[in-house]
Amino acid sequence: MKRIIIAIDGFSSCGKSTMAKALARNIGYLYFDSGAMYRAVALYCMQNSLITDGEIDTEALRGKMKDIHITFEADPETKNSITFLNGVNVEHSIRSLEVSRYVSNVAALDFVRSEMVEQQREMGKQKGIVMDGRDIGTTVFPDAEMKVFVTASAEVRAKRRYDELSARGDNPNFNEILENVLQRDHIDQTRDVSPLKKADDAILLDNSNLTREEQMEWLIDTYKKLTTEC
Ligand code: CDP
């Protein structure tokens, strides 16, 4: 069977990563989380005093880009992908609400995006990958054979993120999360460089009322149809 590139884009917190990870595991593909890369850059800014009074020091960050190395490794037990920032495992810290507060502003910077997109295209050279994000089907891999654009209502998405943070022992506030989800939607859709939008040839998936099992069945069906066709 032909090995393809699967691009999964969509709004924040609609379960893209969980879905993309599970799909990759199911069909024996590698999974790449492009959002984790932008989160790692935001974390780098926080750790290196590049944020003052909530403002990112854009020029200082531009000068530091060559010092930011993001890599992925598979967890030997769970096989889940773990994000490393300059050799340090940051998989847990990049998921904090504080990183979520800055990430969309960091991801709106053109020099950050061009660097990340270059690295993402490198990862795609091997084919047989699932990558999720905001611009994978539009900018990173416009020729991806399978493109899915995921959405769900803002309340459903905030509830999912709330449950995720609670499950890992944080003490989240639902309204703060909802506000963050809406704010990131706005920044992601209105930025100048690669704004979040559905590629014309992407299939729309509204998963507000789908169980994980129903969603996986739909994804595998779509994948099988596409790979037997091409
Ligand atoms: O998990 P969630 O959907 O909440 O976000 P994420 O995939 O971890 O991405 C975090 C943020 O990075 C998003 O809100 C976007 O602002 C940005 N991002 C992007 O601009 N382009 C991508 N390909 C992936 C993420």
Image: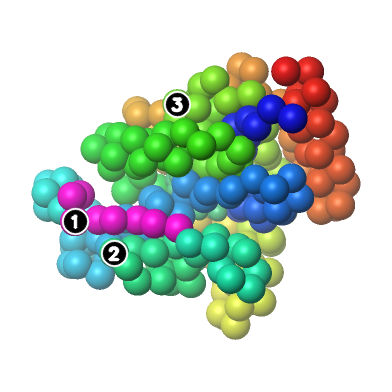
Q: Which residue is mark 3?
A: 139
- Which amino acid type is marked by label 3? Thr
**What residue lies at 35% left-to-right and 71% top-to-bottom?**
88
- Which amino acid type is marked by label 1? Asp
Asked if residue 14 shows in the view, the reply is: no
Q: Residue furthest front?
A: 1
Q: Nearer the viewer, mark 3 or mark 1?
A: 1
Residue 88, compared with residue 134, is above or below; it is below
Residue 222, by quadrant, is top right
Task: Say which of 84 and 138 sits in front.
Answer: 84
Q: Quadrant of the C terminus?
A: top right
Residue 221 coordinates in the image, percent (x, y): 85, 34
Q: Nearer the viewer, mark 3 or mark 2?
A: 2
The residues bearing labels 3 and 2 have C-alpha atoms spaced at a distance of 26 Å
Residue 172, compared with residue 159, is above or below; it is below
Residue 173, by quadrant, is bottom right
**What residue lies at 58% left-to-right and 49% top-to-bottom?**
31
Region of the chain picked out in magenta, as a range:
65-72
Q: Which residue is mark 2?
A: 86
Task: Say which of 146 and 9 sits in front.
Answer: 146
Asked if residue 127 shows in the view, the reply is: yes
In contact (CB < 8 Å): disc 3 and disc 1: no
Q: Which residue is mark 1?
A: 67
**What residue lies at 34% left-to-right and 35% top-to-bottom?**
118
Q: Quick check: is 195 in the magenta stretch?
A: no
In contact (CB < 8 Å): disc 3 and disc 2: no
Residue 203, by quadrant, is top right
Q: Which mark is residue 56?
A: none
The residues bearing labels 2 and 1 have C-alpha atoms spaced at a distance of 8 Å
Secondary structure found at label 1: helix
- Which amino acid type is marked by label 2? Asn
- The verdict on label 2 being within 8 Å of ligand 1 is no
